[in-house]
């Protein structure tokens, strides 16, 4: 990830800082290759340093890019920062998005007066939002793995199995295929429970005639996938089919609008307008999508409040939904790569309403 470090250094003058203290573990992994649970990095034009405690020294020796100087510290890594800071007056950026107030106060006590702490959260996330070819390859493989697991679970049927049984089977199958873990806790929600966008699987059997929302993803080689399909466990009824087709129309409109230069708010509006015209605007309460990479939710955002603009290399979800309280929910989600001349759907599952036993 040497290229990522160089791109970060190029952003430091814009942020008016001399170096950046990186404490968020996902950002540390992106910049250094380290995936342990305690570590920090200090990065500047003449400074590349990494610190961890005794538990992870050998792991860091294997994972951390050799361009980083190593420092061994106590469990409280902030104590190592004082010795890593270069001489003279230093404008030191810190991640005010993720750093707790107590840690900031501790850092201020540890550092000499010549060091000025500057809120600089979001710099690494800006770089992470633009994926290179290797990152796209890893996301694509994770999506293919997750697709295969979904198809296996659907072939086994849904009716009579509980939401929880289906979720466990799906996650187990992804692990069997090589996933390190699910990208997030899988959602399997049947009937009225599907009207909860972030429903948790229950020990409730899936009944014939119900819609089932399945939202799942795999983490492979550090990168995540994310997909949602709504499946009919037997004939769902005309109202459910009508809503499904409405959500599909909105999703296709959103996919068509994904391209470099479009704003996240604009793309969200394209899909949202379709749902509003279908009379279900009040039943679509979340954003249209989000970036996916080392984390399953990252920049850029597609929402009514987004200030992001799409650029080539972004990988985002497009996931409109309609949630009818007390009746059912429908969500359809794909992963999409923004390319130089348009976009490409990364996962390969059909979006027709699948009916299974």
Image: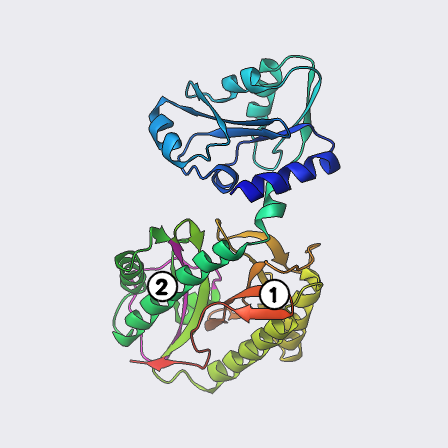
- How is colour applied across the structure in the image? rainbow
Is 77 one of the magenta-colored residues? no
Residue furthest toward the top? 112
Q: Position of residue 224 (x, y in %)?
A: 44, 55
Is 214 one of the magenta-colored residues? yes
Q: Position of residue 25 (x, y in %)?
A: 48, 37
> Nearest the camera: 28 or 65?
65
Residue under pointer 1:
339
Where the C terminus falls, by quadrant?
bottom left
Q: Taking 207 as reference, is 82 left or right? A: right
Q: Main secondary structure of the magenta part?
A: loop
165 is higher (above) or lower (below) than 110: below
Range shown magenta: 196-219
Q: Are marks 2 and 1 in contact (CB under 8 Å)?
A: no
Specify few, some or many for label 2: CA neighbours under 10 Å numbering under 14, 14-19, or 20 or more.
many
Q: Secondary structure at mark 2?
A: helix
Specify few, some or many for label 1: CA neighbours under 10 Å numbering under 14, 14-19, or 20 or more.
some
31 is higher (above) or lower (below) than 275: above
Residue at screen point 58% across, 79% down: 249
> Nearest the camera: 7 or 89?
7
Question: Quarter of the image holding residue 4?
Answer: top right
Q: Is residue 78 visible?
A: yes
Residue furthest toward the bottom? 238
């Amino acid at each position: 990830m040497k290229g990522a470090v160089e791109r970060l250094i190029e952003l430091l003058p814009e942020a008016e800082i001399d170096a950046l203290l990186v404490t968020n573990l996902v950002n540390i992994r992106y910049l250094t290759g380290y995936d342990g649970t305690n570590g920090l990095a200090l990065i500047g034009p003449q400074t590349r340093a990494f610190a961890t405690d005794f538990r992870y020294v050998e792991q860091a020796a294997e994972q951390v890019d050799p361009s980083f100087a190593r420092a061994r510290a106590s469990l409280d890594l902030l104590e190592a920062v004082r010795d890593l800071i270069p001489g003279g007056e230093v404008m030191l950026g810190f991640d005010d998005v993720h750093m707790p107030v107590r840690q900031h106060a501790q850092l201020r006590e540890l550092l000499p007066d010549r060091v000025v702490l500057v809120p600089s959260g979001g710099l690494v996330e800006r770089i992470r939002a633009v994926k290179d070819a290797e990152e796209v390859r890893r996301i694509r493989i994770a999506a293919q793995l997750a697709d295969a697991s979904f198809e296996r679970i659907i072939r086994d049927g849904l009716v009579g199995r509980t939401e929880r049984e289906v979720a466990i089977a799906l996650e187990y199958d992804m692990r069997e295929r090589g996933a390190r873990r699910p990208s997030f806790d899988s959602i399997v929600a049947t009937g009225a429970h599907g009207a909860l966008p972030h429903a948790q699987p229950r020990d409730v059997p899936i009944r014939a005639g119900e819609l089932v929302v399945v939202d799942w993803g795999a983490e492979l080689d550090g990168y995540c996938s994310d997909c949602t399909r709504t499946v009919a466990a037997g004939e769902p009824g005309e109202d459910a089919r009508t809503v499904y087709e409405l959500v599909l129309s909105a999703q296709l409109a959103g996919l068509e609008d994904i391209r470099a230069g479009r704003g996240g708010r604009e793309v969200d509006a394209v899909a949202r307008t379709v749902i509003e015209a279908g009379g279900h605007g009040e039943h679509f309460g979340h954003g249209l999508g989000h970036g996916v990479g080392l984390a399953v939710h990252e920049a850029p955002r597609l929402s009514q409040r987004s200030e992001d603009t799409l650029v080539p290399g972004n990988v985002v979800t497009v996931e409109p939904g309609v949630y009818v309280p007390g009746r059912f929910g429908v969500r359809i989600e794909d992963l999409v790569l923004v390319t130089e001349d348009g976009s490409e759907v990364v996962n390969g599952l059909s979006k027709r309403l699948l009916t299974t036993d």
